[in-house]
Each structure stands twice: as C-alpha cells, then as structure tokens.
Amino acid sequence: MNKVKVYMVANLQIHDAERYREYEKGFFPILKKHGGEFITYDDNIIHFEGDNPLTGRVILFSFPSLKHANEWYSDPDYQSISEHRRASVTSTITLINGLPPR
C-alpha cells in the first residue's frame, strides 16, 4: 500500500492566532517539499450527524504515499515549526489511506 495516496485531516481549535500564523508561514513550503497537496480548509464546518461534532477549523491535505507523509512529519524543519502549532491550538491530526487505483 506504499503507492496509495494518503489524506490528512486536521481539526484545530485555535487559541493563539498570531502564533498559529507563524506555523502557517512555514507549513506550505515544507508540505510541497514532500509532495504534499493542500486541498482545503473550513472554519465554518456543518455537522450533519453523530454525537461528537467537529468544531473549529478542519484542514484537508494529501501526500502521494504513506512514505511521503511520514517523511514530511519527521522532517526536522516541520518539527521545528510544529512547535508553533502545538503552542497555539488544540488539535487532532488523522491520516486516511486512499483507495488503490482500479
């Protein structure tokens, strides 16, 4: 499954917007460096069903493979800027495997 595209879903509750902007400034170049693609984000998500609705910001991005995602996450440059994210938001980040080509 190493060649299957993977998707990252991040759910953030931003409590320090200024510090979070520092994270955003460094995020995109590192994402691109590892073949990542920013898909979308939404601060006004709509809950359709279920007992635990997401709140805050939802971000969706992808990588060509799990290997690319792991290399992005473990990149020392990413880990350095992620300290801004950790200090400025409460978050969950989830990886979802795409379907293999049919």
Image (cartoon, rainbow, N blue to C red):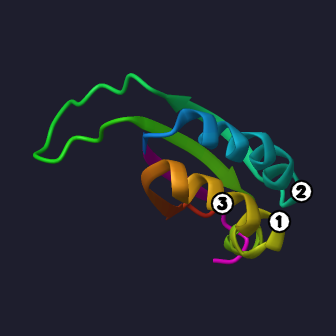
List the residue tagged with mark 1.
Answer: 77
Within the image, what quadrant is residue 97 found in? bottom right
| For the residues bearing labels 2 and 1, Cβ distance under 8 angstroms | no
Mark 2: few, some, or many residues within 10 Å (few <14, many ≥20)?
few
The residue positioned 43% from the left and 54% from the top of the image is 91
- Horizontal placement of 85 versus 32: left or right? left
Q: Nearer the viewer, residue 44 or 100?
A: 44
Magenta segment: does it hold 26?
no
Q: Residue at x 62, y 42 (%)?
A: 19
Are there few (<14), some (14-19), or many (20+) residues within 10 Å of tag 3? Answer: some
Dots 3 and 1: beta carbons under 8 Å?
no
Tag shown at residue 33: 2
Distance CA(mark 3)–CA(mark 1):
9 Å
- Nearer to us of marks 2 and 3 is 3
Percent across and percent down for residue 36 are: 76, 52
Picture quarter with the N terminus: bottom right
Q: Residue at x 81, y 73 (%)?
A: 76
Point out residue 83 in the picture as x, y percentages from the top left corner.
Answer: 64, 62
Span shown in magenta: 1-12
* Disc on res. 82: 3
Q: Is mark 2 on a helix, strand or loop?
A: helix
Looking at the image, residue 53 sits to the left or right of residue 70; the answer is left
* Residue 84 shows in this picture: yes
